[in-house]
């Protein structure tokens, strides 16, 4: 029974674990335990990324996102300085590091246990996080800024605060990658599926506000792609900072 429940919760990057409380009507997400997840991955001889994908029946999902990023030119900068917002289990970090061999990698993760594990496991800088800023990162210092499964649930104004911070830390020609739930992700059927589920955490982020923060005069949209998320999908945006800013 627990395996079946975890398969369902995996759609939302959740897992049933001992002493975890989840309120169906809550706007907050519960996170899987770093210690338990890492131990279980080691027992099965898998990376944390592969273990999490297996546990949530999402085999290949992370690679598909990375492949789409690569197709849109996200890794063309040599030895970039990278910043990830909401690194979580490090499933994207693991693959981004292998893909572009970054000179420096900054991670902002709110879950203390995962932040500590990531800091020990990878050669990264685990930054102190307040959930709405990149306050410890210097202006115009980052070549690749990416985030996965974060803006799909953050409160609207926190997403906009992060966008403002992304604009501050992005270097000349920086690549910016993130996903969110836009109008394109909520057709009538998908909306009804969400309404009929027990989950209230998803946040709609209209594209108008994205274009306001990443205007064509300063950012070039390299492309979009979709990835499965929850009852439907999320939409990825890949921007490049313009030379003229």
Image (tube, grey):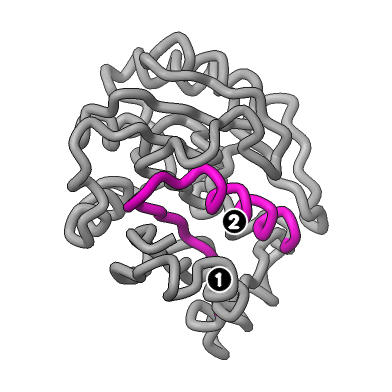
Instruction: State the residue at coordinates (30%, 70%).
Output: 223
Q: Is residue 240 left or right of residue 5?
A: left
Q: Image quarter for residue 110?
A: top right
User: Under tag 2, what secondary structure?
Assistant: helix
Q: Find out whether residue 177 is within the magenta segment.
A: yes
- Which is more N-terminal, label 2 or label 1? 2
Badge 1 density bin: few <14, some 14–19, many ≥20, Cα 10 Å: some
The structure residue drawn at horizontal position 56% and vertical position 14%, both measured from the top left corner, is 116
Q: Position of residue 81 (x, y in %)?
A: 35, 32
- Residues rendered magenta in the picture: 156-182
Instruction: State the residue position of label 2.
Output: 163
Q: Where, quadrant-wise, is the C terminus in this rendering?
A: bottom left
Please tell me which residue is depicted at 47% across the width and 49% down the height of the picture: 148
Q: Which residue is mark 1?
A: 210
Q: Residues within 10 Å of mark 2 (few under 14, many from 20)?
A: some
The alpha-carbon separation of the residues under discs 1 and 2 comes to: 8 Å
Q: Quadrant of residue 201?
A: bottom right
Q: Position of residue 212 (x, y in %)?
A: 59, 74
The answer to whether the residue labelled 1 contacts the one labelled 2, judged by CB atoms less than 8 Å apart, is yes
Q: Residue at x 53, y 64 (%)?
A: 180
Of residues 240 and 70, which is closer to you in this image? 240
């Amino acid at each position: 029974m627990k395996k079946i429940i975890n398969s369902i919760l995996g759609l939302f990057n959740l897992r049933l674990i001992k002493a975890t409380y989840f309120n169906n009507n809550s706007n907050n997400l519960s996170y899987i335990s770093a210690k338990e997840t890492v131990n279980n991955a080691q027992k099965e001889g898998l990376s944390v990324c592969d273990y999490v994908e297996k546990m949530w029946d999402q085999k290949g999902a992370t690679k598909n996102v990375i492949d789409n990023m690569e197709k849109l030119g996200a890794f063309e900068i040599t030895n970039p300085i990278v910043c990830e917002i909401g690194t979580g289990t490090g499933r994207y970090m693991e693959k981004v590091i292998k893909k572009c061999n970054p000179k420096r990698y900054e991670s902002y993760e709110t879950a203390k246990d995962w932040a500590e594990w990531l800091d020990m496991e990878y050669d990264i800088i685990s930054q102190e996080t307040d959930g709405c800023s990149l306050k410890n990162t210097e202006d115009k210092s980052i070549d690749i800024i990416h985030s996965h499964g974060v803006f799909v649930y953050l409160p609207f104004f926190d997403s906009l605060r992060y966008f403002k911070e992304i604009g501050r830390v992005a270097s000349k020609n920086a690549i910016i990658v993130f996903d969110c739930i836009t109008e394109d992700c909520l057709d009538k059927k998908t909306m009804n599926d969400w309404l009929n589920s027990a989950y209230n955490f998803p946040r709609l982020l209209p594209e108008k506000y994205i274009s306001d923060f990443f205007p064509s005069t300063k950012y070039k949209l390299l492309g979009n792609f979709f990835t499965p998320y929850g009852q439907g999908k999320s939409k990825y945006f890949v921007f490049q900072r313009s030379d003229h800013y």
